[in-house]
Amino acid sequence: MEKSNKIILFALILGTFMTALDATIVSVALPEMAKELGEAGHNTSNISWVLLIYTLMLCCFILLWAKIGSNIGYKKVFMSGVLIFAGSSLVIGLIGFCPQIGLGIIILMRAVQGLGAGMCMAVSLAMVSAYLPKEVRGAAIGAVTLAASAGTAFGPAIGGVLTTFHWSYIFFINVPIGLFCILLCWKFMRIEEVKTEKKKLDVVGALLLFLMLFTLIMYLNRGKDIGWMSETGIAMIAVTCICGGLVAWWETRNKDPLINLRLIHNKQVNRANIIGLLIFAAMAGCYLLLPYYFSLVLGMETIEYGFLLIANSLGMMVAGPIVGKIADKTGDNKIFVVIGCIVTALGFFLMMRFDVSTSIEFIVVALFVMGAGVGMAAVASTNLAFQYIRPGEDGQLSGLINTYRQAGSSAGVAIMEAIFTAAIAGIVVSDLSGLIPGFRASFFLAIILCLVSLMLALSLKNKGSSDELTENA
């Protein structure tokens, strides 16, 4: 790979890693933020909006940003996203020294930060196709895919270190990184030629999609507090379903839909995206529960278990690029999706053996195995989906992939938390070993999700296979 291409790839990895990092890096700082902002001892639902609003704004607009990128150019959207992200990070960091400004402004700026992050994620995979040669595209897609996963995994460790100084540093660190990323993009990325005709933006579709995703993610994240089957919860389910139906109705009648229906109807692309949704649901639920296991059962400090979670990211970073390079040469992605699902399930099987006396070495091995499986499955399924696009569809597929994965992550967190709570209900926790059944039940569910992914993976077909032409394309 030429030097300029390596720098372009590095810029994409940097932007993707940075925006994914902020989805989890803030979690360890919430207690300190609540204390300084006068929220300590109050209902935690207020401070928790610092996390939730970021996820909402990131996920709900990804497909819109992908469509805009297809119209005006991916570089413009990506650089604008990094600039918005870095600028809002600076403002939030400064509020740390003026806490009297209040939590409301921080939540507002986190919403802006989430919008910037969504712009970056929406077009990052598409930019690989736009800027890098075909012979390295699989490895590059793998690297960008893993950057998103690694950013999420590294968040608690980096957040734990920076918060020992002050919570504002978890936001200040984004500013120099963001500016450096913008500089690399400006200097080494050409303004790509927009090959598709600019058309009027599908505002109605964007609004309906926003309402559907917003209520769905709100329900998944707030269902436990508001009551899964309460009047409010049922109303949110109804709004999600109605908006989903309206999206399907409207998009089939729009000449230039926000959602590329050809990609939705393509069986191979759809299966690959569902695999990504299920794998990311399992992984995100794992990220939710593991800190409780490390802190409550094993008595670890935040920084200790934050660094322990890096084993998961190392597994991804070892397996993912290897898979990408081999797939570039052979064109066979299906086999690695299958192997990835099996290895991920094996990792969760090992995690089911976690108890009060589990050694650090065993934990590291289990996390590494799970991470390696996720890396293989995520990279290979992404590469396979990109085999089925037509010219000009890379941006829409990039947005679609990230929407599935963000939705899967939100669902995984909600479902695994519910499973964990149900599993320990009625158990008298005389000692912390009483929490173990909850962890094991949740990790068993993760295995089930991996096995469902495996069933889908076995039905995948690489582009150019003998019966691929029978698929909807």
Image (cartoon, rainbow, N blue to C red):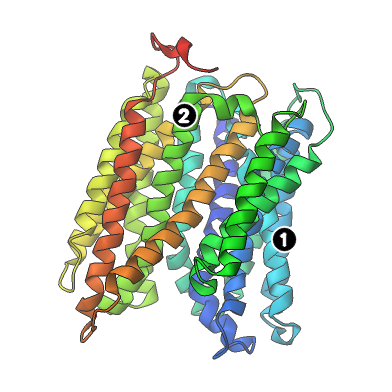
Q: Amino acid under label 2? A: Asn
Is 3 located above or below residue 247 in the figure?
above
The residue shown at (52%, 26%) is 386
The residue shown at (45%, 62%) is 414
Q: How far across and down, in percent of the image, does residue 150 sit?
A: 44, 52
Quarter-of-image position of residue 123: top right
Q: Is residue 125 above or below residue 172?
A: above
x and y percentages locating residue 425 in the rendered image? 30, 75
Q: Which mark is residue 37?
A: none
Residue extending farthest front: 231
Which of the marked residues, 1 or 2, is nearer the chain's N terminus? 1
Q: Crowding at label 2, few (<14), some or many (≥20) Cα neighbours within 10 Å?
A: many
- Say which element carries label 1: helix
Residue at numbered disc 2: 383
Q: Which residue is mark 1?
A: 112
- Would you say the residues marked 1 and 2 are in contact, meaning their CB atoms lie under 8 Å apart? no
**Does residue 372 appear left or right of residue 232 in this picture?**
left
Q: Amino acid at mark 1?
A: Val
Q: Residue at x 48, y 49 (%)?
A: 408
Taking 61 as reference, is 201 left or right? Answer: right
How many other residues sit within 10 Å of disc 1, few (<14), some (14-19) or many (≥20)? Answer: many
Answer whether residue 221 is visible to the viewer in this image.
Answer: yes
147 sits to left or right of 124: left
Assign a secondary structure to mark 2. Answer: helix
Q: Is residue 180 visible?
A: no
Residue at image point 65% right, 19% down: 391
**Residue placed most toward the observer, 264 or 185:** 264
Question: In the rendered image, which quarter is residue 438 located in?
Answer: bottom left
Q: Is residue 169 left or right of residue 392?
A: left
Residue furthest toward the right? 200
